[in-house]
Amino acid sequence: MRVLFSFRIPLVQFRRSLWAQAAVYSETGDAASVLRVVRRQLPELNQDSVVVKMLAAPVNPSDLNQIEGTYPVKGHFSEAILEGERVAVGGNEGVGVVTAIGSGVCDLRVGDWVVPRRAGEFGTWCTHTVVGREQVLGVPLEWRQGVDALTVGSMKVNPSTAYRLLRDFGHLGPGDWVIQNGANSGVGRAVIQMARALGVRTINVVRDRSPEEYGSLVRELRLLGADVVVRDTELGSESFRAQVRALGAVKLGLNCVGGRMALSMTKHLSAGATLASYGGMSRQPVVMPTSLLLFKDIAARGFWMNRWYERCEGEERDSMWRGILEMAKEGRFVTQPMRISAWADVSLDEAQALVRTAVAWGAKHAFVFP
Ligand SMILES: NC(=O)c1ccc[n+]([C@@H]2O[C@H](COP(=O)([O-])OP(=O)(O)OC[C@H]3O[C@@H](n4cnc5c(N)ncnc54)[C@H](OP(=O)(O)O)[C@@H]3O)[C@@H](O)[C@H]2O)c1
């Protein structure tokens, strides 16, 4: 990534010892049970590290899976976080502002915004942290100007996944159709908005709910750009089958649910289409009937954003993030609605309560650190 302010004289800040609050866990398990908020003294800044004050950090399903111990990227357990105990700090995504830099850091300066380079290296659910320069990526000022911290701090997982799914699968062009389940999820909402920007049309499957809730969800998704919204319970109906047949080719299915909902959605794909699975919210396997493989030549693929980040750095990643933030700036992309917990100047008990509440809600929650 091109970073602003490179080759400046390092600005070294000498500081008094800095204390932070952090949501930590010493053993894996249900996040609401194992997370606790502690007060920790941050280590001294060394020449290659930076002090980061967090600005915003979302709660993603994968963060909760990581704390449960069921996610392939494990939490970074260390004895350096709390004296005498091996713990990890929760959260993998977020944005913070650099408040001090080590003498050897030449390409960041105080006031720059940074995001974690890789998942699992340090936790983001904390007020402040000290990290190695290599563990963060700078977000250039011109990318983020006019965009709020929560949008910047949550671009790396859900919007980036949506961006890749629409570009890397199905060879989509303007006028093509995509069908997706979990359409009201963070990724699903980003897919709707990014598809609209590409001229790609979307069929959006959501779980059944009360008529009032469904009506208001349909309005919300349509405002984002959804072309068709349908309940999962209607997927198998003859009237919906006829409606899809009349639309034209459905070249891509996006699945974050698995189980029966994935199967009934896959049946609407056109011959030669791709089913891209990127999540498993139902915790049920993806089943692909032989007939869909043989007679419709459906290709089943998987996508994991972390794997993409391992492979693609530099301009490919930068242009994706620039593109997402540009859309946000222009009002063509909004992040999913999230419950916000303001985590600042609170006692340990208050911080503990807000962290427990946040993780008990599952995802769709974010911490902001005013
Ligand atoms: N592969 C990757 O790199 C990648 C990247 C980002 C996200 N993901 C995955 O994508 C999924 C969505 O993430 P997100 O942050 O966008 O989620 P989110 O905003 O929390 O939304 C969760 C979605 O899953 C639905 N859902 C929850 N439990 C379900 C169940 N038992 N059966 C069917 N649907 C269920 C919810 O529907 P209701 O509103 O009806 O509850 C909602 O649409 C997660 O599995 C996440 O881990 C993967």
Image: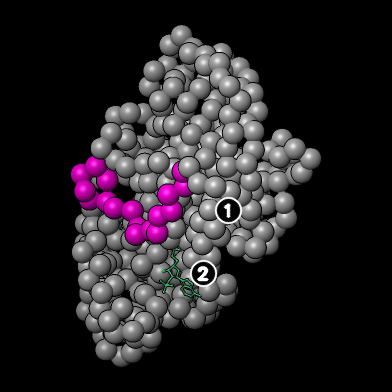
Type of amino acid at the residue the image marks with label 2: Met
Q: Residues within 10 Å of mark 1 (few under 14, many from 20)?
A: few
Q: Amino acid at mark 1?
A: Asp
Identify the residue at image location x=54%, y=58%.
Answer: 353
Element type at marker 1? Answer: helix
Q: Mark 1, mark 2: which one is toward the viewer?
A: 1
Q: Mark 2: is the Cβ under 8 angstroms from ligand 1?
A: yes
Pointer 2 residue: 281
Provide the residue span drawn in magenta.
Answer: 328-344
Q: Where does the image place residue 3, in percent across and percent down from the top left?
A: 41, 24
In the rendered image, residue 161, in percent from the top left (x then y), is placed at: 42, 52
Q: How far apart, in angstroms, are the residues tagged by discs 1 and 2?
A: 31 Å
Q: Which residue is mark 1?
A: 349
Q: Percent from the top left, x then y, of residue 264?
A: 43, 81
Residue 292 in the figure: left or right of residue 240: right
Residue 128, image x, y percentages: 53, 36
Task: Please name the residue shown 75% across and 44% down the image.
Answer: 86
